[in-house]
Image (cartoon, rainbow, N blue to C red):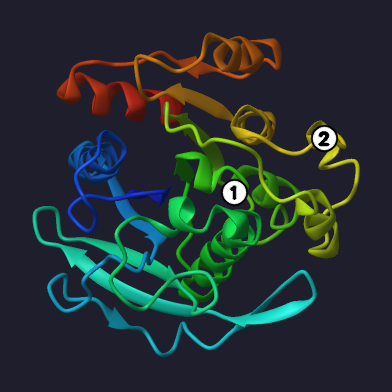
Amino acid sequence: MSTKKKALYISQEVTPYLRESFLGHMCQELPARVQENGYEARTFMPKYGCINERRNQLHEVIRLSGLNLPVDDTDHPLIIKVATLQSSRMQVYFIDNDDYFQHHAVTDLEIRETPEDNDERVIFFTRGVMETVKKLRWEPAVIHCSGWVTALSPLYLKQVYNEDPTVGKAKVVFSIFDDSFEGELAPRFREKLHLDGLSPEATSLLGDAPVDWMTINKLAIEYSDGVIAATENVPVELLEYARSKGKPVLEFQPDADKDAKAVVEFYNSL
C-alpha cells in the first residue's frame, strides 16, 4: 500500500480534454508535478458536452454511478466516468448528468452556453465529487480546488462533510484564477443551498443580493485553509480579503518547476 500523501484536485477545466486554456493547462500540469514531488494525485472535473469520450478514452464506472443527488428537491442521477492522463498516468474522474451536461457536441462549455443553470450545476458537481470520493475510500491529505465552478467545495467540506472519515480531515486549498463570469447566479441560489442542508449562518456571506463572481470566490476563500493566486491578474480585493480572514496566501509563481515545489511546501505548511 502506498504511503504517499494524497492530493485530490477538483478542477473547472483540464487539458487536453478541452480546448487549451491557461486554467486547463495548470490543472493538468500542477498535479503531475506535485506527484513528482512526493504526492499521489487524482483529479475531478465536469464532463462537459464538448469532451469527445471516444478520443479521450472515457468509460463509465458502474460501481460509482447510479446515486441520485437532490438539487432543489429534484433528484438527478450521478454518472461517473474516468480516463487516464497518459503523460502522468493520473486518473481523471468526470462528473456527468443529462440535466446539466450535454451529450452532444456543443460550441462552448455549458457554464457559458446555459449560464442560467450554473447555480444548480455547481451544487450538483460539488456533491458528485464528494460522494464519489467517499465511495472510492480515497483519503486525501489535501483537496485543491481550481476555478469558480469548484468554489462551493470548501463550503461543503467544512459544513457538510467535516465529520466524514474520507474527506473531513483534509486541508482545503483554493486557487483563484481570473476566469470571471458576467452577471449573477440564479436568484434562488442561496435558497437551494439551504434545501441541500446548509444553514443560513453558513451561507450568510452571500447576503440577499444576487451572487456574482467576486462573491462566490469570497465564499470559497472563507472556508479554505489556504489560498493560491494562480494568475498574475487575480483581483487584489480577493487576496486582501483572504489575508483579512487570516488565510495563508501563496503568491503567483511564474516558474512552473518552482511553482510545484512552492505548492507542495504550501500544502505541508497547512
Where's the N terminus, which quadrant?
bottom left
Task: Please tell me whether mark 1 or mark 2 is closer to you in this view.
Answer: 2
**Looking at this view, is 246 or 229 the one in front?**
229
**Looking at this view, is 40 or 190 the one in front?**
190
Query: Which one is earlier in the sequence, the residue at label 1 or at label 2?
Result: 1
Can residue 83 be seen in the rendering of this structure?
yes
Q: Using the image, determine if residue 86 lies above or below residue 79.
A: above
Where residue 75 appears, x then y in whole percent? Answer: 69, 82
Mark 2: which secondary structure?
Answer: loop
Work out which residue is located at the far left of the displayed protein and give it: 87
Q: Amino acid at mark 2?
A: Ala
**Which residue does the numbered mark 1 point to in the structure image?**
153
Q: Amino acid at mark 1?
A: Ser
- Specify whether 184 is left or right of 59: right
The residue sitting at 18% across, 17% down in the picture is 255
The residue sitting at 80% across, 75% down in the picture is 73
**Which residue does the numbered mark 2 point to in the structure image?**
209
Q: CA distance from mark 1 to mark 2?
A: 21 Å
Where residue 36 appears, x then y in whole percent? Answer: 17, 40
Can residue 1 be seen in the rendering of this structure?
no
- Specify whether 72 is left or right of 118: right
Dot 2: within a 10 Å radius of its alpha carbon, few (fewer than 14), some, or many (20 or more) residues? few
Mark 1: which secondary structure?
Answer: helix
